[in-house]
Amino acid sequence: MRLMALIIICFGIISCTSLPEPIPETVSDQLQHYPTSVQNCAFQLVDFKRAVQQQGVQDAQLLWTPRYPHLAFDRFSVSLIPGLISPQSKKQWLRYVARQAEIQRKVEFQNLPNKAGFQLGSNEECAQQLTASTINDRQFWLHLQQLPPTIPSDYQSWQRVFGLYPISKSLATPSIDSEKKRIISGFIQPLHDDNVTYAVTEKSPLNQQEIHRWFQQATQLTPLSWPLLSDKQIARLANHYAPEFLIETVSLDDKPGQLEYQRNGQPRVNTNKPTLYVSQSYTQFHGKILLQLNYSLWFANRTAKASLDPYAGQFDGILVRLTLDSQGKPYILDSIHHCGCYHMVFALDQQLAFAKRNTNIEAPITMRLHPKQNAQTLRVTFTNGDHMVKGVHWSHSSSQARHLNVLNYQQLRSMPIQGGQYKSLFDEQGMLMASKRLERLYLWPFGVKSPGTMRQVGHHAIAFIGERHFDDAYVLSELFLKP
C-alpha cells in the first residue's frame, strides 16, 4: 500500500513537471551573450513567450529556450551544432532555426486568447535584429557550442523505475515479436473486397533531371551539403512524390479526412473532406543530409475489434515519410501511426543494406522493395479498422483514385475555433488527449507517456524496448549500413 501511494504521488508530481518549465522572472544572466544594443529585443521575445505559457498555448513541436529567444530547435538542427565551423554553414543553420522560430511565433500569436500588449510585427522586427546581430558574433557562437539546447526525451525514466522495466521488458518481448509477425503476415493476406484508392490527382510536372539540378544547386551553396530548397520547390516535390493510398474500407472509420474543431470546442475528423497533410524534415545519413517528405492521413477512429479493445478509440492516423537521396530520388520509406507505434522501414534502393540488429533497442519491421519497372508511383496499402500498413509497392497511377486535398501539416498547430479564436490540435506536451487509449494503463512501465495517444511531430517515441525517436537525426543511419 505504501508503494502504491508513492507511485500515485509520483504520478501527480510528474504530471505537473512534464509541462514546459516556467520562464524565470529574471533571465538576464542567460542573455549576456547578446550585444547590449539588442538585449531589449531579447527581453521582448522572452516576455511574449512568458505570456504564451501563462495562457497555455505554447507550441510543443519545436524546442524554445530563453537562452536563444529568437530561435527554435528540432533534433536535427541541434545535431548540426558541433559541425558549425565555417561562416557559410553558420549562416545557413541560423537561417533555418530562425525561420522555424518565426513560424512558431506566428502560430502562438494566433492562438493567444489575449493579445494585449503584443504585436506580431514588433516581435518579428526584434527577431530579425537578433538574428542579424548574431551572424558574425563570436561570443554567441562560442556560447552556443558550450551550452547547446537539449531536446527533452519523450521517455520518462521514473515510469521505468517504478514499472520494474528490466522485468517488464523480458515479459513483453515475446508479445512484441508476436505482434510484428502478425503485421508481417498481413503482407501476404488477400486484399479486402471493399477498398478505395486515394491520391493527389493533380501532380506537378517534374522530371528527374530538373529535380537533380535543384539538389545539386542547393548542396553547392554550403559546406554542409544541405539541400535547403525553396518552399515552392519542396511543395512541388511533395506533390510529385505523393504516394497513392489504397485503404480497405468497411466503415467511416476507414475514410481519411480533415481535422477541424466543432462548435462544442472538440476536435473531429471530417470524412467529407479527404485530406493529406504534408511537411518536410531532414536527416543525417552516413555523412549526408537528406530531405524527407512527410505525408499524414487522419481517421476518425480506430475501430474496436471486441467489446473491450484497449487499442481502439477516437482518432487514428498514419505518418508516411519518404527520404530522398542526394540527387532527389526516392531512397527510404518509413511509417508510424501518430501514436509512434508500429515503425516500419522499407529500403527503396537496391544498394541499401540493413545494419545488424541492436539487441538493446526494439527493432522496427524492415523490408526491401522490389525495384520499380517504369512505375513512378508508390502505393501504400492499409488494413481496415486498425489502419496497419499491409503493402508497399511501385505502381502506375490509378485512374479510379479519389482526390486528396493537400494541406500543410503546420495548419494543425493553429486551427480556427468558434468566436474567431484559434487553437492547436495538440496540447503543450504535444499530445492529442482526446485520443487516449486504455493501453496506457498497462504499457506505462516502458517509459512512454500515455501509449496509444496521438501526438505531434517531434514527440514520437517509437520503441518500447530501449529508446528511439522518429525524428532522431541519425535514426536511419543506425538502421542501415553505410552505402
Image (tube, rainbow, N blue to C red):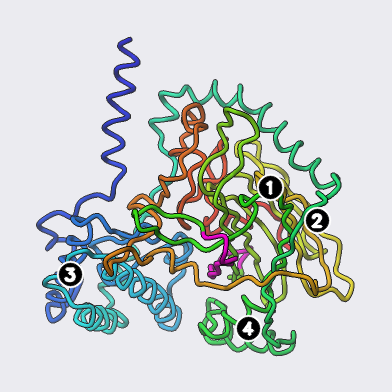
Distance between mark 1 and mark 4 Cα atoms:
33 Å
Label whose residue precedes the other's in the sequence (1 or 3): 3
Front residue (pair 123, 295): 295
Q: Nearer the viewer, mark 3 or mark 2?
A: 3
Residue 350 in percent (x, y) is at 83, 64
Helix, strand or loop at disc 2? strand
- Residue with the mark numbered 3: 115
Above-or-below relation of 265 to 302: below
Residue type, mark 1 in image: Met
Q: Is residue 281 magenta?
A: yes
Label whose residue precedes the other's in the sequence (3 or 4): 3
Helix, strand or loop at disc 1? loop
Distance between mark 1 and mark 3 Cα atoms:
43 Å
Distance between mark 2 and mark 1 Cα atoms:
18 Å
Residue type, mark 3 in image: Lys
Asked if the residue at tag 4 contacts the one at tag 1, i.e. Cβ–Cβ closer than 8 Å, the answer is: no
- Residue with the mark numbered 2: 368
Residue 188 in percent (x, y) is at 86, 46
Residue at 43%, 72% in the rendered image = 84
- Left or right, 242 with reference to 453: right
Distance between mark 3 and mark 4 Cα atoms:
41 Å
Label whose residue precedes the other's in the sequence (1 or 4): 4
